[in-house]
Image (spheres, grey):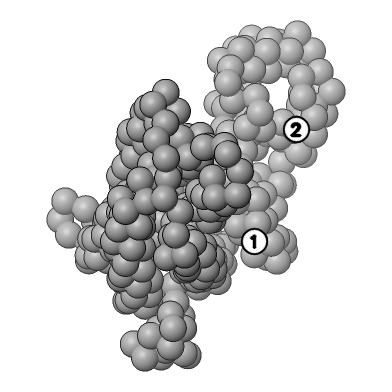
Amino acid sequence: MISLLIKRFINPADDLTGATARRICGVICGAVGITINFILFLAKLTVGLLSGSIAVVADAFNNLSDAGSSIVTLVGFRLAAQAPDEEHPYGHGRFEYISGLIVSVAILLMGVELLRSGFGKILHPSPVNVSPPLFAVLLLSIALKLYMASYNNRYGKKIDSPAMRATATDSLGDCAATGAVLLAALTGEFTPFNIDGWAGVIVAGLIFIAGVRSLKDTVTLLLGRAPSREFIDEIKEIVNSHKDDVCGIHDLAVHDYGPGHIMVSMHLEVKGSDIYAMHEVVDGIEREISHRLGCETVIHMDPIANDSEQTVTVRGKLETLIKERIDPGITIHDLRIVPGPSKATFVFDSAVPARLCHNVDAVKRKIESTVEENFENCIVVTKIDIQL
């Protein structure tokens, strides 16, 4: 059904990562999710109240919270698709992350409340009236939630939507929760044991765990998640394809303003004395990265003095010393040797692996002291860059 609706409103030849296609896809998936969850809420609430099962009622309100979450996600897609304005020149893509955060908090609150109700039923158990309609509703719920997990996961990957992937994960958790309720109903029907309260607690626990995971993912995105290794490798592959003109890349930064709103900046060390020719090369690399990866790209050009034998020799010795004495993952760039009356000053940047970024000041001091101890009559000034 989802595929038919999306084909009805989106041309199959269109790129789903485009702003308009993403919004339409998100709205369709969200609207179907709202409809399914509201139908399940009404059905489970009815059979839960008639049977006296706290586990089924808890599962019903779980579906109601999912319907609310789908509404929030749908609104988030609409807001994220707004065009850039004066106050938000990089667009409103992070609204999608904010909607994911709201969904996560709602899931957590629902989990806490259902835990309280479940423990109340354990302390004060009451009989459950199991009926064929109850079994039918629970089986239907599992089937529909598996369908929701499937389409949210599929299209969440296609349009790179954290909110839809979180919904897919939540739907799988709902399947497990409803399975626990079904097991409790079967146990109560065919054995003398009433485990309805325990099933309610299990449902609540699964909901709470799903909320914690979803909250972690969305907070990570809002704080600024490191780009994927595949994304970084693709950038480096493009740059390295111009090795006749470019001999180094550093200060690479990726800024995420929401799906489809990625900005990349970097410094490239370029060869040659014709500054205009090098500028054309760098402009071409910018355009290639932006086209292939769908991001805005800004490159700062660093001409290097390969014709200076002293600079080349000192740089090689410096990098070997730092790798051997401090860490093999450290590289240096932008070396300048400034002569002085009694001592020369070595000015350079040190690119440090992210695993060492917890104490960059100590790494900086270690680099400077190590070089000064091993090179006579020099002063060292280095700036630390974090490698992606």
CA gap, disc 2 to disc 1? 20 Å
Q: 10 Å neighbourhood of mark 1: few (<14), some, or many (≥20)? A: some
Q: Could you tell which of marks 2 and 1 lies nearer the N-terminus?
A: 1
Rendered location of residue 72, percent (x, y): 27, 55
Q: Name the amino acid, label 2.
A: Gly
The residue that appears at 35% across and 72% down in the rendered structure is 32
What amino acid is labelled 1 in the image?
A: Glu
Quarter of the figure that contains the N terminus: bottom left
Is label 1 in a helix, a strand or a loop? helix
* Residue 1, placed above or below residue 99: below
Residue at position x 47%, y 64% in the image: 132
Image: 279 above or below 213: below
Vertical position of residue 338 compared to residue 184: above or below: above
Residue 329, numbered circle: 2
Q: Does the residue at mark 2 contact the one at mark 1 (Cβ under 8 Å)?
A: no
The residue lying toward the viewer, choosing from 33 and 178, is 178
Q: Residue tagged by mark 1?
A: 234
At 52% from the left and 68% from the top, the residue drawn is: 143
Helix, strand or loop for disc 2? loop
Outermost residue to the left:
86
Badge number at residue 164: none
Residue in front for this viewpoint, 187 or 257: 187
Image position of 331 with respect to 240: above or below: above
Q: Position of residue 172 (x, y in %)?
A: 54, 56
Horizontal arrangement in the rendering, residue 40 relative to residue 88 (left or right): right
- Can residue 168 be seen at all in this image of the molecule? no
> Dot 2, how many residues are within 10 Å of its Cα: few (below 14), some (14-19), or many (20+)?
some
What's the residue at 80%, 34% (across, down)?
Answer: 316
Horizontally, is 341 left or right of 287 in the view?
right
Residue 377: x percent and y percent?
71, 10
Whether residue 281 is visible, yes or no, is yes
The front one of 129 and 314 is 129
